[in-house]
Amino acid sequence: MPSYLPCKKNNSNGYITYVNLISQANPFLFQTNPTLADGDVKISIDGGALNNLGTLPVVTPAGSKEVKVVLSQAETNGDNIKITFSDASGAEWCDLGLEIQTSGQTFDEMVQSIWDKATSALSTAGSIGKLLVDDINATISSRSSHSAADVWTVETRTLTSFGTLVSDIWNNATRTLTSFGTLVSDIWGNATRTLTSFGTLIADLFNTDSGETYSSAVAGSVVKEIADNAGGSSLSLDGIADAVWDEDITEHTTEDSAGAEMQSHATPSDVDASLATYDAPTRAELTTDKESIITEVDANETKIDTIGEMVFTLLLDIEAGGGGAPTVEEIDEELTTEHGDGSWKTGLEFRPD
């Protein structure tokens, strides 16, 4: 619905207003459902001639004391609009004069014009407009040079001055970070994160000489709360071992890790394939192979004994000088000539028991 206040000059929407007519019978009361006829309501624009309104006013809502007056665009095209009500029959309601001074804009248009005003036009020294132009010359977000990293590099940071803020947060029945947008990711995404400003916090955590027990140290803490309400049974060596061997191997795919190697080389299908291609010897085959080996060893042993006897016989013949065989001294001399000095004779003089 368009705005009609104040009445805009030559407004394409025209103008609408309401009036009440005083009863002639009782001047203390407005006339209920007044009768209006042609010629009862006339208009004069900027002192011009009186003419009937283009639209005769109507009681609205029906049967009430309210009279709706509607002006066309042409009827608003003036600075001073004068409307005169006069009961032609002269017997029901009193005369009424209505004066309307027009404006260049309605209130709605005025507000919009303020925000649409070009900054170049706001040049009057000492004015609010000039002050805004001079001082609001950049976005609010660009007013500070501080970043998230600057906040964390401040030497002293504490929550102690916030009263019971921390305990109130953890004691709240419902806790969620979903409404904080990217707060968590922004914190962890910051290039520099440090705990150095927390004094002896880290040292205290790893101090084994504090004299304080674990139970007393974590009593009432978030860690204790989580431990008490996490549920489930305590860990044991057997439980850990079972969990390791029952782990789904398909979840371990990191290159060069033990899990990946076992998955790629020791899958059930690989083991099954290897077992399927392995032809294990039967008991009968093993027995036959064993007997063959024994027979071959016995035969070689016989050959060795025979060779040994032949060698000793020959040595005896050589030593005796029979059959024209060379003597030990001759053999020793020959071996020395061919292979150098050595105890050849001592070896040749060996006799079996």
Image: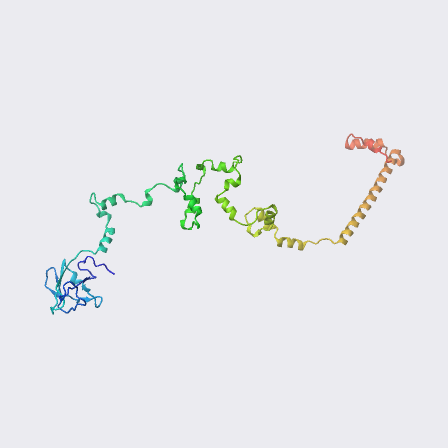
Residue drawn at 55 percent across, 51 percent down: 251
Q: Is residue 15 above or below residue 319?
A: below
Name the one closer to the observer, 12 or 20. 20
Name the one closer to the observer, 97 or 246. 97
Question: x%, y% of residue 221?
Answer: 48, 43
Q: Is residue 305 above or below residue 247?
A: above
Question: x%, y% of residue 254?
Answer: 54, 48
Name the one closer to the observer, 93 or 196. 93
Q: Quadrant of the N terminus?
A: bottom left
Question: x%, y% of residue 96?
Answer: 13, 63
Residue drawn at 44 percent across, 47 percent down: 171
Q: Residue 50 vs residue 302: left or right?
A: left
Question: x%, y% of residue 169?
Answer: 42, 46
Residue 206 visible in rendering? yes
Q: Quadrant of the C terminus?
A: top right
Q: Residue 352 vs residue 233: left or right?
A: right
Name the one closer to the observer, 331 or 42. 42
Q: Is residue 211 above or below residue 272?
A: above
- Tally the marks: 0
Q: Residue 74 vs residue 178: left or right?
A: left
Residue 181 visible in rendering? no
Residue drawn at 77 percent across, 32 percent down: 339
Image quarter of residue 107: bottom left
Image quarter of residue 51: bottom left
